[in-house]
Amino acid sequence: EVTMTMKSIGLVALLLAAIDIPNVLGFSTARKSIASLSPTTTSKLTMSSSEEAAAAATPLSKSDHILFDMPVSNNGARIRAILYYKQLSQQQVEIISPMKLGGLRSDEFKALSPQGLMPALTIQKEHASGMTHLSESDTIARYFLAEYSGTGPSFQPDNPRSNQINRWHDMYLTTIQGCLYKPASRFPLGNYADRKSAISAFQKNLKIIEGFMSEDEGMYLCGDEVSLADASLFPTCVFANFMLPKFEDSQPPLPPKLTAWFDNLRTNDSVFSKIYKEIMDELVTSWDEKNHRWDKIWLAGLRDEAPGTIFDKIVAKEIPATIVKEDKHILAFKDINPLAPAHVLVIPKDRNGLTNLRRASAEHTDILGKMLVAAAEIANDEELGFGDGARFVINDGNDGGQEVYHIHLHVLGGKKLGTMV
């Protein structure tokens, strides 16, 4: 038996006060400790793991869940539509901007969403799964549908059309929607190396989704019952309806059946009217009027306004040429005024703003690569007169001796060439 003296008890108390209890007891206690700090203090902590960084979000709200999202997010809007339809309280879910964590690129936000993409969710109540946070809009949406299945509409009608549209939307629209608003530095997008081909694919997939639609006269994609497909597709159609005309205004932005469905929801459904207003207010006032986002985006504010050239007529087969190589992207033909025994020009069929090389951006990476690969294949073709090597030249502008303002690569060889200049 040990008898504790008052002196020894005091010593133990001092030792306990010196111990960092949260670190000793682990993450659960650390969350309680962090919860007592202000958001500003929390953001300055040095976290030892992604779970601890995720926990830093907890002092922002005492709600059961925090949805990190912003009004302009079309992917987050599918979740907001579910929350609004189910009329969940702020105690159940509070929506907070990722800026409260330092923005999408902050370590705190990436602990919740590793790709740094909205939306993200923290689960602040005890959950049977043991999970404390989720990322990706479809995952979060289905979590809320399961968590609050007894409240409001199910969003899961007995109709496979909802899952088909939802999946197609997530695979083939959201993956390339950046073609409508992202700068050239963010390319390529998915399988598309340039904005023009990505926009074309985006429009094509809108038509495919329209083909999945029911012939039913109901208000929603699956008839009279709102579905996850409606919640997912509608916000993206807000984007498409506003942004596509900035690139192509000669045709309606949405196919006819999608247009009718879209107009009906934004006019006659109070939840989707709210979603429409949330997104559009940000697109118009912040993205467009304040930041002039599209002024410097290729095919929107920036376009190829230079006159056509003789090369366009060669591509169109309006003028004859000795073609040595052709595919859907490039055309190669012999120069009519050769400067070497073997002299071939390689051009992109679609100039796409490349009047000269100085006009190139990240959106042109793919076509410039294709031109170089074609030039290499040509330079290895002895039947064209090439021997041991070749010279590859791109003239640019007046000082560079450019004559035709449609970018072209000279492949010269067939003899030992002299100095460059």
Image: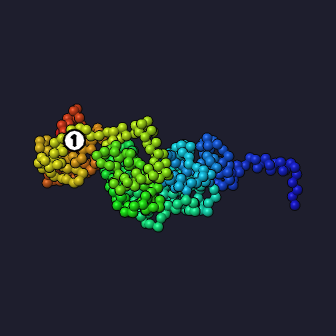
Q: Quadrant of the C terminus?
A: top left
Q: Give the residue type that dot 1 points to.
A: His
Is residue 13 at all visible to an observer of this figure? yes
**Is 310 or 107 nearer to us in this picture?**
310
What residue do we see at 46% from left, 55% from top? 231
What residue do we see at 47% from left, 45% from top? 277
**Is 119 or 339 nearer to us in this picture?**
119
Where residue 179 sits: x, y (%)?
37, 48
Where residue 298 sits: x, y (%)?
33, 42
Where residue 321 sits: x, y (%)?
12, 48
What residue do we see at 59% from left, 43% from top? 43
Reading the image, the residue beneath label 1 is: 406
Q: Quadrant of the N terminus?
A: bottom right
What residue do we see at 39% from left, 63% from top? 216
Where residue 404 sits: x, y (%)?
19, 39
Q: Is residue 300 left or right of residue 34?
A: left
**Is 54 or 240 nearer to us in this picture?**
240
